[in-house]
Amino acid sequence: MLKFKRFMGGSWGQRALLIIIIFVIMAIGERKFFTSANWSSILLAIAIYGIMACGMLFVVLIGGMDLSIGSMAALSGSLLAMNWFNSGYTTAGFAKGLLLGLIAGLVVGLLHGVLVAYLNLPFFVVTLATQYLIYGFVVYITQGGFYYPARQTGFDPFAFMGNAKFLGLAMPVWFFIIVALITGFILMKTTYGRRLYAVGGSNRAAELVGIHTRRHTIIAYIICSLCAAFAGMILVSLNMVAGCTTAKGYEGTVLLAMMVGGINLAGGEGDIFGAVFGALFVGILDNMQILLGIPSDYNKTIQGVIILIAVALNVYQSRKAAGIISPGKARRLAAKAAKEEAAAAGK
Amino acid sequence: MANDNHVLLECKGIMKQFNGIQVLKNVDLEVRSGEVHALMGENGAGKSTIIKIITGVYTRDGGEIYMDGKMVNIQTRQDSREAGISVIYQELSLLPALTVTENIYLGQEIKGKFGLPDWKAMRKATKELIDRYNFDIDPDAIVETLGMAKRQMVEILKALAVKAKLIIMDEPTASLAATEAETLFNTIDFLRSKGAAILYISHRLDEVYRLSDRLTVMRNGENVGVLEKEEIEPRRVIEMMIGHKLKNTDDYVRKPVNDANILEVKDLHYKNMLKGISFTAHGGEILGIGGLVGSGRTELISCIYGALKQDSGTITYNGQPTSHHILANMKKGFGLVPEDRRQEGFIPLLSIQQNFALASYDQIAPHGVVSSKKEIELAERGIKDYDVRPPMRNLPVGNLSGGNQQKVVLGRWLARHPNVLLLDEPTAGVDVGVRADLYQYMRELADEGHIVIMVSSDLAELMSVSDRILVIHDGVFFEEFMHENVTQEAILLAGSGVHTEEGRALC
Amino acid sequence: MNIKQIRLLISLLLVVAVALFFGLTSNSFFTTSNISQLLRESAYIGTIAIGMSGVIISGNIDLSAGGIVCFSGCILARLAHAGAPAAVCVIGAIAIGVGLGFINSVLVNHLHIAPFVATLAAGFAYTGLGLIFTFRDKLGRQVNQSIKNPGVELLGGKVGIIYYSVIVWLILAFIIYFLQTRTKFGMHTYAVGSNEKSAQMSGVRIYRIKAINYMICGAMCGVASVFTVAYNHTATPSLGNAMEFQAIAACVIGGIVMSGGFGSSISAVLGSIFFMMLTNGMLKYGLNVDWQKMVQGALIIIATSFDAQFTRAYTARMRKKNN
């Protein structure tokens, strides 16, 4: 029993419990949930969120956050679709779009990194600002319109990215698996990944063992933007449409995935399993809403409430572990002690 | 007013214990009005504890406090403030973005019409206060734009604004340059002439000598005596602080140094802290660096390590100048165990294994890819060699006891067999049993022919561990002691700028 | 002249410069109808910005402001549509704002969640909860329902060329300015933003100060929602969308430093006017939403970088002079 309690108290126990609850609810409520068609659509959603979550993980580990990933995805997706469409569906046009999308990710990530690491600007202001900046840029290059590339006969690299299947799994899922494996490898096996935890855990201590913290920060932001750019390109290929509304609001969903995955938003704590689990969770959540017929505008309601619960739980646990109490409780305790003292003095 | 020498503050039989350890044993303290009363004692003598009890930060377990002959029951900061006691802490508690006037009246606003704060009155009162005490401060200046000395004046003004009867100053010169300190002393003289009582806590004998009318010395939580002005004399004060003469009594055999391993520092300057430090450290010896807290010891080893950049002067290791990049120095075999373990030493969230690995990625990850086998090996060996408890390599270091945390930080470097190991207060907050282990590891490293440099405020430790001790005073090395003939008293005297017969004068 | 006054002057000069630029280069800028509309639009962001100013000065951030506007706006629309008197609608909207502000402060103070995480998440929740109350047809689709409520409609009106919203905004701005600069509460707000620990040591009740600022911000969001709904006669799902961003932008441009302890509601007012003038002027040049968003995003980054450098340089100079 004690072992069970300990297991449930740990983050893995909570993760398992959450998933089981969802499965039970879905099994009771909706027969469609377990159909293979439904699962392939869940997996696709998971793949897109998952790739973004992998990138975001780097930034969150050093105690930052990137609110611009939705816009970034829209930008790279639009660049890809535009070039593919405008070139008259040539492979060269596709390659150009792909390259431009990734370069855009690189540039944006570099900008974030430099502003945060060298100018010490608060990251949420910087990435909130670039969220708008990039969004505006997407509207500008797309003229506010949408690109609907036509399906090509023969090999179609654009459609291939999002719609082809390999060994029964859609390509985006394979891409996600690859990105997750690489992320896991970087974080667990390379010195860069290991040092990232140190930077997030204690910047000063990391500096004193010779870690170039600013450089690590910049690279983390670049990886995050690159992942978002990549996810955006897969997303437009999947939906065969690109424009400024592509991936709009995804930063919130990915943030939710981070929190559910037990990744400490203050930095230094979290792993690839958490990110994958989080993506899994938000993917299933999306699907649940569709199956249960909840209008899509309640997305934010549900997400917001879950984020708050997840954060409050996390904070509660860590504070309990550290023995911190709330100001109200501290006051009450102090008042009680004073009263007792007064009573003792009175005697 | 100035010759009205009645007893202002009287503490009788103050008791305090933490976790069953008696920190204050029946302490009496008496401060008269119109005097500067110094409070001295070694680290852990109970100075700050009694101050915290007087200012209401801690509650006392027993004893009575009287102000002006009336018993006061101080339980909170507010009680203390109401009794007329103001305190100026080491780290100034001013708000940088507010103006001088706002800072002075924060939390004690003068109320005008409709209960709103009356800014005009506050500004006027500030101006009057500044004029009365002849300070050179603009009441509308934003505190951030003031230097440390002026900020201290604002703190003093803050105390004067509430007509504090007793001003407590806790190491007020710690963050001041010499000229700034002189300004502060003049201010204190002036305050005394106006009849204010000041309780002055300091490590620095010269300051106490210069300022105080009377002096209380504390040792091990007890008041060991009060000296009148004419009785204050460095040797006597230090004898009282230490209690008994302590010498090294071990069978010490001096081993030859390793001249193939030499660190040379020449004429090092850093801000106002270091004013031309020169010395040579040899392999095979533990070099202790003594001196008062804030005398530039930490800055010195930070410069050597590359964490700070000196203003001028050279640091060479085996003839090669050292780098200003920590990583380059680490590659040459430098290591640093910093003073603030929790903030700078280890990373609390990471496991023992990862903390061990932090400094050794060049060894366990030759091509940027970490070898799990080597990493685990490193951690297991470290845990075994340095007896880290509990011996669980996946446990976050934040969960270990202070001593075991320090073993991880030290072990991280020792595993690399560093050519130059720099330690800053390596045993602060470490329990006695673990200390002995740490000393042994340091000695083993030195015996391998490496250089070990240790900064310490713990005199017993400095004496017993080091082969040679250099004491900083006023930004330069003042005296050099050898293990065989060093005494606690001599280290303290040298740190206060008094030459001793035990040491060799360096300036 | 101290740094606060210099920075305020810079903001004022920026406003004048932009006004002159667009006024001289476009002949449709200084028309009465354009000025009237421009001020009306400034008032929406501006009202939120003056509330936000206190939150930022106290060293926090409120990313849920848009969510609060959405939530209270949707409830307000329901109330008004049901025929409630205008006073009830207004008080209701403001009360909701205060309540949501209080929730924010609980998340930040008592659960110790980082302000940007807490309010970002709360913003999601508020927006989502607000959308429950939007008008829908039988299939659950949102519809644009026009509200018929004379009292509320009156609030969307104007005297001369000045809308009521502008008058209320400026009055509130001065009230908040008064609170910030002349009262104990205001001084304590700056103290908390400057250094929380030191403020606490000086006897400032930091949790209370932070909570009140969040509640004021919520109340201002409520006021903003009243005037938006009153003018548009409806509550759309996009109500409040991106308003927190615009309000923060206004604060930052006006010279309120993100790390706290600096600026005032007047900075927020100037920032809002500057922000809206720029948007409005760009429209006159045929630069649409794309350019506006790009320029707005860039402006925030430039303004925060500028302020960081500006305060550093000023402090260094003054330190030299003062010592």
Image: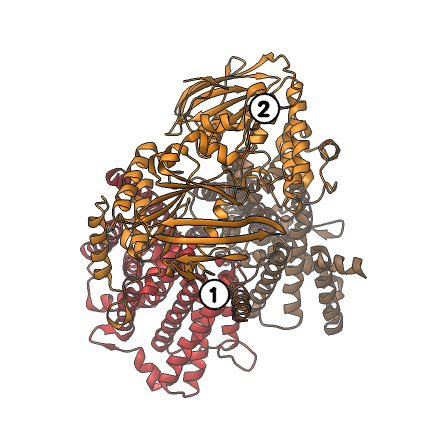
Chain colours: A brown, B orange, C red
Q: Residue at horizontal 66%, vertical 72%?
A: A292
Query: Is B98 placed left or right of A40 in the picture?
Result: left
Badge 2, how many Cα within 10 Å: few under 14, some, many 20+?
A: many
Instruction: Measuring from the top left, give residue B413's x and y in whole percent.
Output: 63, 29
- Residue at the location (39% across, 82% down)? C89
The chain carrying label 2 is B
Whether residue C258 is visible to the viewer of this picture, yes or no, is: no
Residue at figure coordinates x 31%, y 38% from the top left? B185
Marks 1 and 2 on same chain? no
Q: Which residue is mark 2?
A: B466
Q: Is residue C81 or residue C322 the one in the foreground?
A: C322
Image spot of residue B374 (x, y percent): 73, 31
Residue C81 shown left or right of residue C33 in the figure? right
Left or right of residue B341: residue A170: right
Q: Pick the residue in front: C93 or B392.
A: B392
Q: Position of residue B507 (x, y in %)?
A: 40, 18
Task: Give the quarter of the image for residue B288.
Answer: top right
Looking at this view, is C94 or A206 the one in front?
Answer: A206
> Residue C105 bears which disc, if any?
1
Name the secondary structure under disc 2: loop
Quarter the N terminus of chain A occupies: bottom right
Label 1 environment density (alpha carbons within 10 Å; few <14, some 14–19, many ≥20): many
**Pointer 1 chain:** C
